[in-house]
Each structure stands twice: as structure tokens, then as C-alpha cells.
Image: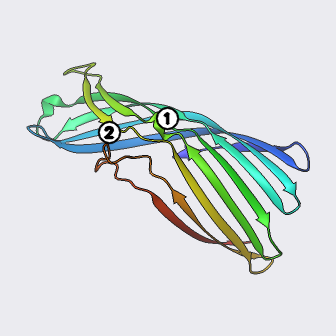
Amino acid sequence: VNINPAFAYRLSDAVSVGAGVSVQKLQAELSNFVPGAGVAKLKADDLGYGFNLGLTVQASPATRFGLAYRSSIKYELAGSATFSAADALNGSIKADLRVPESVSLSVFSVIDPRWELMADVTWMRWSRLRQLDVIRTSAPGAGSTLQSLPFNWDDVWRFSVGANYRVSERMKLRFGAAFDQTPTNDVDRTPRLPDQDRTWLAAGVQYR
């Protein structure tokens, strides 16, 4: 869950800047079977804080460009570990996690009174996520590593194109497509986080 108040300021008729603050709630639950201990469930959550910056340039009356940066956010997750067949192993846990920053470049252009075209490319620094160590914070084994989850994710790119079609002064039809690279790899991919390259299709209606 992300709450992101933001503001913008017009420097001139052609240039605007913006900024915002993110307050993010992350809640996670991971489960797996442990021989002799039954089903293990790890639950943890935390609040994280970040920021985002933006720049818009009106290059011509019909075309504008945008540049946006969203910061990484660090979480100090805290929660519990429970085992369905070994209550003595239950206890509290913690884990440090940092989600990636991203940079986006976009363009929007009015082709004629009815058609508007747009595109963007986004880079995400998923290589920040190398490994997640779950540490016990209570007995038994306080301070020891309960689980170490390897990710070894890679930085990725996302490409998208779209269009608006003005049906009338009040209504627009929107549609687009995107290609989104996966950060995972064949060696470290797990059933917990199955993933692959994705192709997105989108459609919408705007009515004033």
C-alpha cells in the first residue's frame, strides 16, 4: 500500500517540476514445508519512506516529454515464524529489504484533433535484491539465520506505447501495450516468486 502526496510547480510555459513523498506499507507471508516441523509460515511487515521527482518539458504545442525518478525504499521487516508441527521452534523474526529505485522517460504527442500518441521506457534497479536473510530475534536461536532466500535479480527495462482516441469533447478511448522484463533468472527462480517476461495490454475510457 502506497500513499504518495505530491506537488508540481510551473517554472515557465514550457517547463514544470514536481516532487512527492511515499509512505509505503509492506506486508509479506512466505510458507514452505520443513521435514519434521511441518508447514513453516513467516509473516512480517514494516513502514518505509521514499520520494519521487519529476520534470515535464513542453517541446512544442503538440509534444511534451517527461522524466521521473522514484527512490528506493528500505524496510526493516519484523514479524513471526510459526511451525505447524513444532511449536517449540516458533518465535519472532526480522529481515532487511530494499526495493529498487526507478527512472522513466516518456513522450506524449497530439497527432490531430482525435489522436494522441504516447510512449515510455522505465529502468528498475532490481539488482539491489540479491538475498533476503531472515534472522531470529527470540529464543530458540536468537541472532541466528532462520532462512536465507537467494534472489540475485537483475536490473530490468519496461517499454510501453499507447494512444488516446477522442470520440467527442467529453469522451476518450485509451489503449496500449507494454513489454516488461523479468528480474529473475533460471537458477534462482522459485515457486514462491515465479516470474517471466510479461506483455501487457491495457484499455480504458475517460469521460468528462
Compared across the picture, whether 121 is left or right of 156 comes to: right
Q: Which of the 4 image quadrants contains residue 141? A: top left
Compared to residue 172, the image places residue 17 above or below, namely: above
Compared across the picture, whether 204 is left or right of 127 comes to: right
Tell me the crowding category of disc 1: few under 14, some 14 to 19, or many 20 or more residues within 10 angstroms, Cα based.
some
Residue at 55% x, 45% y is 2
The front one of 158 and 174 is 158
Residue at 36% x, 39% y is 151
Q: Which of the 4 image quadrants contains residue 139? A: top left
The front one of 1 and 135 is 135
Compared to residue 56, the image places residue 86 above or below, namely: above
The residue that disc 1 covers is 47
Compared across the picture, whether 163 is left or right of 86 comes to: right
- Give residue 78's position: percent from left, percent from top: 37, 30
Q: Which of the 4 image quadrants contains residue 59? A: bottom right
Q: Residue extending furthest front? A: 186
* Three-letter code, disc 2: Lys
Disc 2 + disc 1, Cβ < 8 Å: no
The residue that disc 2 covers is 43
Compared to residue 126, the image places residue 182 above or below, namely: below
Q: Secondary structure at mark 2?
A: strand
Q: Residue extending furthest left? A: 36
